[in-house]
């Protein structure tokens, strides 16, 4: 079977240095990247276009947790001149997929304002339908939100961030938001094994790129470091990236964040032949090495090769891995008892209990926790910490 063009590891990557969210500069940059990828306005003529930003939760742009509205504004300016049949902004953020939730996230994330004056609309259709993934290795069908399933062209408008579960969030991880609301939690429960979850993400991204005309654009002007995708800190990276192949884009993105070789979903994509093994082998439109952040802060859960978790399963046959692995814990001193973590837990291992003062606090039953970090990702006040086993530092020192 021949490989789909969008999964070709030799696909080019357009990269434009961009240090600020200036509307004129962003519009010029997006037009330049489209040209570098061989995409002209006629590509969009008469087509239904769905733009899928990263709107993981209600966060203003300055927190760098979501796609910056200025990038969407500039992209819509480009599309205004392309005679599209329809342009819709569609996302299923963390938590319930309802019209009310969509209105809230569009408003707080600045998306509602960014759409004004453009030939585009916000999606409020909360239906979905199953889409077959015949070439998937671990998952053969996905429930996909309707505007994405109906689109002729998908523009995957992601945000470059660290990620406590997948190490990095970029083009591949952003497609997980095509799965509706709480169904995403079901996928966490269905694939509690870390490697299986990453294989599923590769199946999903590959399926969308095989069945739709896709363009991946990454907002890497200001990203997030530390405990992303929502609890980290803004960090200037200074560029926009675009490709027709999400795995190629993420390969270079991982090199920019100095975590090349540490992102399992990219490793899986390389194994399948969707991306080159090294970022140096990607055809990039301009030199990008000066943008590499050697001091980019990894999430507390990062599995670096020097970390004992990298070799612990091999040494102990995996029997002690669950005991040593980082896990989420509730910081009860700041927990307000809102229950968001309880509602977002895919295996229902979080319980709201009253403390000695009668105030509700969340408690995680560690014996059932699958370490998906949904609670950390969706906690509105960042009261979920990552606890690492203190023995790991000693083991890592002995391993050196």
Image (spheres, helix red, strand yellow):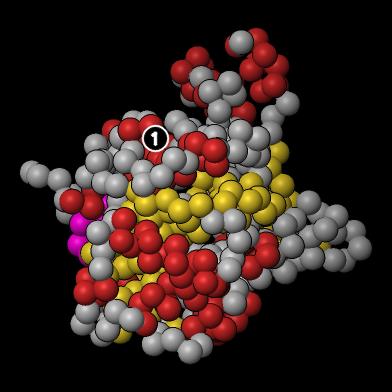
Residue drawn at x 53%, y 80% as measured from the top left? 114
Q: Residue at x 42, y 77 (%)?
A: 76
Q: Nearer the viewer, residue 268 or 61?
A: 61
Position of the C terminus, as image quadrant, is: top right
**Which residue appears farthest toward the left when viewing the image?**
1
Q: Is residue 179 visible?
A: no
Q: Residues within 10 Å of mark 1 (few under 14, many from 20)?
A: many
| Span highlighted in magenta in the image | 205-212
Q: Secondary structure at mark 1?
A: helix
Q: x and y percent of residue 116 in the render?
A: 51, 88
Task: Tell me the quarter of the picture where residue 197 sits.
Answer: top left
Q: Report which residue position mark 1 lands on.
A: 279
Confirm whether the magenta stretch covers residue 177: no
What's the residue at 79%, 65% (across, down)? 336
Image quarter in which the N terminus is found: top left
Residue 215 in picture, x, y percent from top left? 32, 61
């Amino acid at each position: 079977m021949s490989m789909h063009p969008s999964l070709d590891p030799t696909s080019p990557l357009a990269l434009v240095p961009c240090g600020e969210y200036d509307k004129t500069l962003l519009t010029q940059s997006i037009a330049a990247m489209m040209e570098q990828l061989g995409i002209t306005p006629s590509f969009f003529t008469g087509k239904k276009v769905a733009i899928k930003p990263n709107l993981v939760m209600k966060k203003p742009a300055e927190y760098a947790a979501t796609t910056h509205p200025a990038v969407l504004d500039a992209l819509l300016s480009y599309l205004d001149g392309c005679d599209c049949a329809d342009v819709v902004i569609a996302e299923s953020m963390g938590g319930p997929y309802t019209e009310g939730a969509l209105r809230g996230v569009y408003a707080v994330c600045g998306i509602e304002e960014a759409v004004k004056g453009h030939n585009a609309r916000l999606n409020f259709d909360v239906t979905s339908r199953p889409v077959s993934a015949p070439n998937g290795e671990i998952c053969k069908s996905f429930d996909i939100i309707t505007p994405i399933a109906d689109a002729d062209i998908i523009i995957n408008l992601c945000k470059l961030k660290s990620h406590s579960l997948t190490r990095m969030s970029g083009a591949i991880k952003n497609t997980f938001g095509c799965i509706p609301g709480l169904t995403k939690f079901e996928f966490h429960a269905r694939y509690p094994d870390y490697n299986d979850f990453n294989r599923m993400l590769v199946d999903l991204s590959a399926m969308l790129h095989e069945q739709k005309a896709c363009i991946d654009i990454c907002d890497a002007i200001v990203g997030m470091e530390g405990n992303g995708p929502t609890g980290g800190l803004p960090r200037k990276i200074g560029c926009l990236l675009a490709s027709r192949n999400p795995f190629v884009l993420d390969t270079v993105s991982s090199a920019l964040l100095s975590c090349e070789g540490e992102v399992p979903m990219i490793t899986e994509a390389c194994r399948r032949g969707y991306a080159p093994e090294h970022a140096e082998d990607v055809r990039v439109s301009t030199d990008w090495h000066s943008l590499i952040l050697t001091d980019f802060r990894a999430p507390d859960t990062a599995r670096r090769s020097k970390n004992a978790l990298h070799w612990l399963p091999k040494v102990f046959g995996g029997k002690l891995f669950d005991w040593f692995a980082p896990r989420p814990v509730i910081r009860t001193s700041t927990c307000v008892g809102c229950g968001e973590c309880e509602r977002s837990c895919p295996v229902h291992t979080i319980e709201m209990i009253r403390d000695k003062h009668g105030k509700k606090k969340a408690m995680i039953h560690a014996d059932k926790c699958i370490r998906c970090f949904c609670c950390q990702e969706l906690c509105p006040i960042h009261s979920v910490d990552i606890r690492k086993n203190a023995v790991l530092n000693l083991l890592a020192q002995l391993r050196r």
